[in-house]
Image (tube, helix red, strand yellow):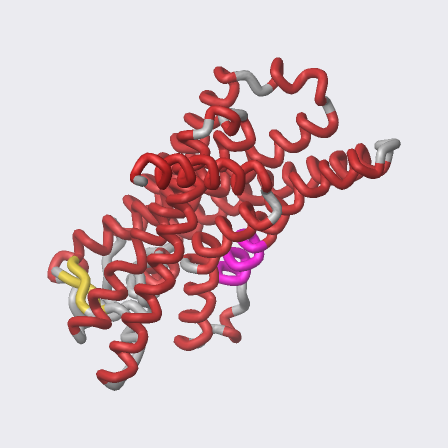
Amino acid sequence: MPNSSSISEFLLLALADTRQLQLLHFWLLLGIYLAALLGNGLISTAVACDHRLHTPMYFFLLNLSLLDLGCISTTLPKAMANALWHTRHISYAGCIAQTFLFVFLFSAEYSFLTSMSYDRYVAICKPLHYRTLLGSRACATMAAAAWGTGLLNSLLHTASTFSLPLCQGNAVDQFLCEIPQILKLTCSDAYLREIWLLGVSASLVSACFVFIVVSYVQIFRAMLRMPSEQGRHKAFSTCLPHLAVVSLFVSTATFAYLKPPSLSSPSLDLVVAVLYTVVPPVMNPIIYSMRNQEIKQALRTLFGDKLLRHQ
């Protein structure tokens, strides 16, 4: 079997066997990709251009939208190109780049979701101290920490994974290069170092999850003590989108990486990978804009003004 020094490319999982199905998958993925670009692009534009949305909550939402754009742009274009051109190839350097970017953006997104739970906690449980605890400097520090954590996490995992000798060929049983599938190609016992790093990352992820859960326990307790039903409804409407996004993100990623080996199969792994790489970037803009009147108003104002200028 070839070792890592002789591998110049990897073979990704083919989404379909027949040409007709490959073209169908291409158009389906293109539609999904354009929907994600449109949704996240609209939210990013609204937050960036409307001064009324220049608050900590929307600052974090802007970063989340940019990360979603990056995540889906890291995975889908290559899958679409392979389906369109009837190929499975990705270069060795391309696989490293895809793994690095995806882990970086995925880790940073989870950090921002944690920061957003803190924002909601302060806004509802400590409203009088909101501007003090979440001023511009604090938000910038939290954002820098989220991006920096994602970068460091990705550097460690990518370097560790691709420094391992590969003895099981170059066929990746997934439509993207992801660490669990690359580890299946390594020599026996060579992957233990990366498993240790994955354990450390899992501990940090668990700590963030506990922080989110504790934050929402405090939030719901504070909401129950609110005397006004209107106040409870407003607090709930600002928390519901974030809670839905966190649930979607955590449930799909947890099942992808912690499912028992007995459940593993190429078709199930493919479905799970689509769930945690494609569904959140597409659904997040819908979840955040469905009940958010401020974003809807910002988009109406922005595009209404542009239309009036062209008339």
Q: Quadrant of the C terminus?
A: top left
Task: Name the image quarter holding residue 187.
Answer: bottom left
Front residue of 149 and 7 = 149
> Residue at horizontal 41%, vertical 46%?
40
- Left or right for 252, reference 156: right
Reply above or below: 192 against 117. Answer: below
Residue 257 in magenta stretch: yes
Front residue of 251 and 248 = 248
> Residue at horizontal 19%, vertical 54%?
94
Q: Magenta span covers which residues?
A: 248-258
Task: Return the residue found at the far front.
Answer: 311
Q: Position of residue 253 (x, y in %)?
A: 50, 56
Q: Quadrant of the N terminus?
A: bottom left
Task: Name the image quarter holding residue 274.
Answer: bottom left
> Residue at horizontal 76%, vertical 34%?
218
- Left or right for 292, reference 173: right
Task: Name the image quarter holding residue 5.
Answer: bottom left
Q: Position of residue 8 (x, y in %)?
A: 12, 60
Reply above or below: 257 against 264. Answer: above
